[in-house]
Image (cartoon, grey):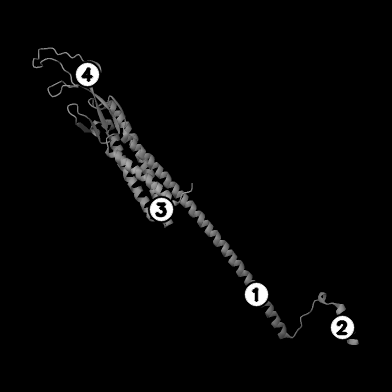
Amino acid sequence: MRMSRRSRTLLSLSLNFFALFFSITAFITTYWCVGTQRVPKPKCSKLRTHQCIDYGVNETDPNKVVYSWETGDDRFLFRQFHTGIWISCEENIHDESERCRSFIDLAPASEKGMLWLSLVSEMLYIILLVVGFSLMCLELVHASNVIDGLKLNAFAAIFTVLSGLLGMVAHVMYTQVFQVTVSLGPPDWRPYNWDYGWSFCMAWASFTCCMGASVTTLNSYTKTVIEFRHKRKTFEQSIREEDAREAFGYFREHSVHSISKSVDYYSSQTLKSGRKTPIPGDSLDFSDIANSLGEEQC
């Protein structure tokens, strides 16, 4: 299906907008990874009578031995947690609130540098998406000017491709840091089981839309250049053909005019000198001469 340059620009702009929306949403939310954490059950009290360990004795006497009949996973609670780029939040087992901690503080010391690099790449990814989106909007404004539109299109394609590469690097580095933190992070935070959340899916959806926008922008730039060169070649060819026709007509008119001037000049020179123009022998008809002589004798 053939699309106009404006339609291709609108498609690129739409993909860039969705990429920007998904990336900002994923950046500010904390559902990149979700799962459960296994923590020991607290002791039962007057305020907490369920999801706790009931020893069934008076703990004021330290000489008494305390037994618990709960074994295995029955001794633990499984609380939900969700983690983003910046913050990790988990359920508070003592009330219905959440406790949030900085994910940078949870990451091992060996992975903090990569995590900061991932954060910087993610921010640059969003900034370059904003720049590419702005350039595409300017291209729509300058749609009537082909040259300005091509320049804006080229810069928009460059910024969009760069943003896509940075986004991919940021997502991969964060995934690696989180997997290392699961194994080497604080014991009270390590997940029992986990999976990727909807924020992580939105981050990769943003990358997909970004690459789609960059490919569409490059395709629009290439097609516009090819169409512009084809129109220019056709225009130059028509100009050459028109110049050739004009030159041919000019030389034909001037050649006829010069021949007529030469004939007129030769005739005038002959009249001035009084000489007769010799008649070629092959143009004489002797039968006509004989007939004319016979008529004169009679």
Tell me which label, 1 or 2, sits earlier in the chain: 1
Q: Amino acid at mark 3?
A: Lys
SS assignment at label 2: helix
SS assignment at label 1: helix
Foreground residue among 271 and 148: 148
Inspect this view and state whether residue 108 appears: no
SS assignment at label 3: helix
Is there CB contact under 8 Å for labels 3 and 1?
Answer: no
Foreground residue among 230 and 80: 80
Looking at the rendered image, the disc whose residue lies closer to the viewer, 2 or 4, is: 4
Looking at the rendered image, the disc whose residue lies closer to the viewer, 3 or 1, is: 3
Tell me which label, 1 or 4, sits earlier in the chain: 4
Tell me which label, 2 or 3, sits earlier in the chain: 3
Residue 127 falls in image quadrant? top left
Q: Amino acid at mark 1?
A: Ser
Q: Amino acid at mark 2?
A: Ser
Disc 1 to disc 2, how far (Cα)?
40 Å
Q: Amino acid at mark 4?
A: Arg
Tell me which label, 3 or 1, sits earlier in the chain: 3
Disc 4 to disc 3, how far (Cα)?
66 Å
Q: Which mark is residue 121?
A: none
Q: Residue at 26%, 31% (x, y): give it.
A: 82
Tell me which label, 2 or 4, sits earlier in the chain: 4
Q: Which mark is residue 75?
A: 4
Q: Which mark is residue 151?
A: 3
**179 on left or right of 231:** left
Disc 2 to disc 4, how far (Cα)?
151 Å
Q: Which residue is mark 2?
A: 292
Q: Which residue is mark 1?
A: 258
In percent of width and height, residue 275 lies at 75, 84
Residue 211 falls in image quadrant? top left
